[in-house]
Every structure is written in structure tokens, then in C-alpha cells.
Amino acid sequence: MQKILFIILFFIPTLSFAQTDKTFTYENKVYLPNIKTVLCFNSNKEQSLPVILLNSSETITFAFDDLLAGTKNYWYTVEHCTSDWQPSRISSIDYLESFNDDRIINYRYSSNTTRKYTHYEISLPNYQIKPKISGNYLLKVYLDGDIKKPVISQRFYIVDSQVAVSAEVTNSMQVADRNYKQKINFTINHSIPISNPYQDLKAVVMQNFNSNTAQINTKPAFIRPNQLVYNDLNTNDFWGDNEYRKFDTRSLRYKADNVKDIFRDNELVNVMLFQDIPRNIGAFANQYDENGNFFVRNTDGRDDRTESEYTGVLFTLNAPAPSANGDAYVVGRFNNYTLSNENKLLYDASRKQFYGNILLKQGLYDYEYAWQDKTANTVETKPFEGAFFQTENSYQIFIYYRRPGARWETLVGYVNLSNKPSDRR
């Protein structure tokens, strides 16, 4: 046990300096191991969803760290996308009223940290990059002005509010799922002419801004004058899941929430969390969480962005493997709920324990455990976290409209709601 523990605890990820030609994928993705802590949010509220209004004063804040430190020649551009995140295949002249690309010149070096890094940051729209139509956008960051050297791809949204969306969260209409699932019913009120809502309009609903949960609605249950109702009994059901687990590394001088121990050496600070247990059996336990979000914080320094330490965080889950062929992962918004070798857990079958060490910047983090069943080709949190209707979740509804004869889809409506009376984000 001790041997396994120390191998994992003091494992320091190797950063590769090599950059091979790749192509961008239309998802939130980091292409280089030295890039960490990608942030993208509406500048009005830290870590809010990256959604802004068209032709408004609102901006998107985008930032990331380079653990190779020094200064790199990073460039960026944006591309308009369809509602299902494919290229719109229109000219940049159609969606930009400015230049096509620009270099990131706003950067700062870390200070008072064991591991050195450089923090890069931009704000969109700006004088160089300014979208002029609504819709889905992909921000692309690449090296040395070469689009074939991708660094980061990041999704964000620009809304041209032309419809009003009212929505509610209720129990699933399926009797067997009423204690485990939540259902979203919503209504679109519009004054714009929609001649064929089955073809021209599309609504995308997702839970906790996790794109893996997205459900697409193309057929309203009822069509009324200036109103479309989506309340079909068999659509927009979501597993309630559970409240997120969390830990607090805002200070490395003391052990805060869920931190069992802190180890230091010359190269890296390591944080050991208390061991977790499955929550799929038993009653629902309500607790405050951030719906999967995370916040970079450092109470020992003055600047969260450049004085926060990078720590190796050891996760331990005491649970048997749910099936014979699969892997367990730690997921949250900090890694866009993706499954990668970085957040995959090792399994000790003799002790029925999962282990993993992830390099994370100081702060407050929500997380949960997901199981990828390779035989069934499914990814679920229920085997470790359970599912309860009472769980507080946030839901996002995006309304896309393609006018007859138009060459692209526009984002004409958006709402963010919670199944609790107050928004706790």
C-alpha cells in the first residue's frame, strides 16, 4: 500500500516540448500537456458561463497557464459554428467585422511559486477580433501563427435575444424514474415569423454546462400563435446525479476542506485528499456545491492568477470496479468532463481502491467520479455517485434559428435555470 501510495503521490507529469502538426476539433480541448487551467467566462461574473449578448458591452474573459514558462508566440482566431458544433462553412467576412486573427500579448509571469508558469489572458470581443452575428463560436489558440499547431480550442456563445424562454424543472414523467431523474419543460415565446418550427428552429438543453448531457429538441409538442411548447413526456429527462464532492486548497499553510495532508519537495507540492466512498447506496444528503465549477484562489498571496501554486492532488476512491471492463475518472468543469489519461484512476483490485494524481492550480474545486464501461460503451457517474431527484442542478437552454434561405444558424434565445428557488452559483 505505501509503495503504491508514494508512486502516485509524488508522480510529476512530464511536459513535452515537441509540437506535431494536428488539426482542431470542435470541442473544449487542450492539445499540449504544458497548458493548464483554461478559463472562459462572461467577464461580469467569474466562472460564469461563456455567454454574452450581441452588440452589448459584455465580454468573454479567456485565460490559461503555460507550465513551460517563458514567453511563447501564441495566436488566436474564432470560427462560427452550427448548433451541433460543426463548421458553419461561411466566410469570416460574414461573421467578423474586424481582423481574422491576432497575437496574445497580455501575459504575466508567476511569482513566489515552486513551479514557474506564464499566465496568458485575452478579452473578446476586442478591437482585433469582433464577431458581428450571433451563434456558437470556437476560439482557436495556436503556436507561432501556424493553425496546424493547435494549443487550445474553446467554445463560447453570442446571443441575439429575439425570443423569450420560460422553463421549469420537475420530476420525470416515467414512473420508474421519478426518484432519480429531473425533467425540463420549456416554452418559447416569439414575435419573429417562424414558418416551419420543425425545420427552422432547434433547442439544445444541457445540465451543469456539461456538453456530454446535451439533448436536442427539434419538434415542439404544441404550436400556438407566437408560442412553442416543449413538454413531451419522453424528452428532456436527465439523471439527477448527486451533489458534487469538493476540496479546498486556497491555502497550503493549513489543511482545509477535504484535505488530509500536504507534502512539499523541491519540485512540487502534493495534496492528499481524504479517501472517498461510493454514494450510490443510501439516502440523499444535501450539501452546497458549485454544480461542477471551480475557482482559482490563493489566500496566501495577493494575486490569484500568478501567485497560486500548482499542486499534485491525490484522489482515492474506496470502491470495487462496477464492471470487469472499464476505467474510472475524476471529472468536473476543471477538465471539461473529458476522459483522458491525465484524470484516469489506477485500480488496485486487491484493495478495491482507485488512485490518481492530477496537477491542479490552487483553489476551490467540485469533482465527481465517472465510470466508463468499455463493453457497454457508456460513461456514467451513477455507479459511484448515485442519482437523486432532489439534487440541485443548473440547466442551460439554447434556442437556434435558421431563417429560410439563410446560410447559417443564429442563437436567438438562452436561459440558465436551477431547480432551487435561488441561484446558488
Image (tube, rainbow, N blue to C red):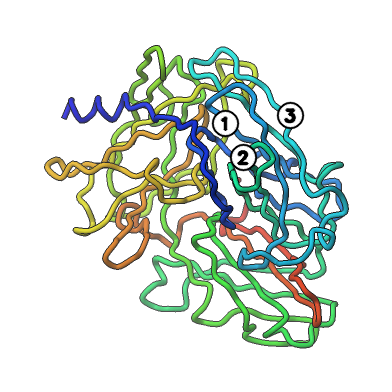
Question: In the image, is 259 to the left or to the right of 21?
Answer: left
Q: Nearer the viewer, residue 102 or 40?
A: 102
Does label 3 or label 2 sit earlier along the sequence?
A: 2
Residue for badge 1: 296
Residue at x 86% of width, y 51% of height: 56
> Label 2: which residue?
39
Pointers 2 and 1 in contact (CB under 8 A)?
Answer: yes
The residue mark sitting in front, 3 or 1, is 3
Instruction: Pick the residue in front: 140 or 267.
Output: 140
Q: Quadrant of the N terminus?
A: top left
Distance in Å between CA atoms under marks 2 and 1:
10 Å
Relative height, residue 230 to residue 98 (above, below): below
| 87, above or below 49, in the image | below
Where does label 3 land, which residue?
A: 106
- Which of the marked residues, 3 or 1, is nearer the chain's N terminus? 3
Q: Can you give x and y, in whole percent of width and height, for residue 53 in the image?
A: 80, 55
Q: Residues within 10 Å of mark 2 (few under 14, many from 20)?
A: many
Which amino acid, mark 3? Asn
